[in-house]
Image (cartoon, rainbow, N blue to C red):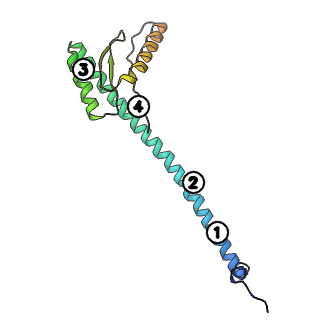
Amino acid sequence: MATIDPYVHFCHTRAVQVWTKLAIGFTATAIVIVSVYGAYQLVEEQRDLRVAAERDLRLTGAALQIAAGNALRDRQPADVRIVVDTVKLRDPSLDVLVFDAAGGLIAGSWGSGAAEDLVRRSIHEAQRTTSAVGGTTASVISVSFQLE
């Protein structure tokens, strides 16, 4: 007497084999489609977030430049300090440093010591490039942030 193993018999039945192949094929296709679409959405979301962050940083930089320029024009360096402190309170991830034309630090937000050397090098490079181009003045806004 021969015994039939139900699992082996199930896999070798022609009708079940076709349905199994179809199910596996549809499942694999669905997984590929969802994975590709998910990867596309991740790339789009990253691009959108980067554009939004850049826009916000440019807006903040322009506002800081105007506020610091007006305060320095009116010879009120304390106002620059207030603006810098207000920005740091609103967004602790931003480090704000305000330098004069000679590269001296006028005001800096607390906790921005690590960025100070980077900004000083950027100012020095901009001044060197500006003098090589023809002596035109340039405003440098250097913003550094760390992606998490």
Name the mark on residue 80. 3
* Residue drawn at (58%, 58%) of the image: 33
Callout 2: few (<14), some (14-19), or many (20+) C-alpha neighbours within 10 Å? few
The answer for how far apart the CA atoms under marks 2 and 3 are is 49 Å
Q: Which amino acid does label 2 sit on?
A: Val
Residue to which mark 2 is pinned: 36
* Residue drawn at (37%, 29%) of the image: 58
Q: What residue type is labelled 3?
A: Val
Callout 4: few (<14), some (14-19), or many (20+) C-alpha neighbours within 10 Å? few
In this picture, residue 48 sits left or right of residue 9: left
Q: Is mark 3 on a helix, strand or loop?
A: helix
Residue 59: x, y in percent? 33, 30
Residue 83: x, y in percent? 24, 25
Q: In which quarter of the image is residue 61?
A: top left
State the quadrant of the C terminus: top left
Please state which of residues 35 and 108 is positioned toward the viewer in this rendering. Answer: 108
Quick one: label 4 or label 3, which is nearer the N terminus?
Answer: 3
Q: What element carries label 2?
A: helix
Quick one: label 2 or label 1, which is nearer the N terminus?
Answer: 1
Name the mark on residue 24. 1
Residue to which mark 4 is pinned: 145
Quick one: label 3 or label 1, which is nearer the N terminus?
Answer: 1
The answer for how far apart the CA atoms under marks 4 and 3 are is 21 Å
Q: Which amino acid does label 1 sit on?
A: Ile
Q: Quadrant of residue 79?
A: top left
Outermost residue, right side: 1
Residue 47: x, y in percent? 47, 41
Report if the CB atoms under discs 4 and 1 are less than 8 Å apart. no
Please state which of residues 134 and 53 is positioned toward the viewer in this rendering. Answer: 53
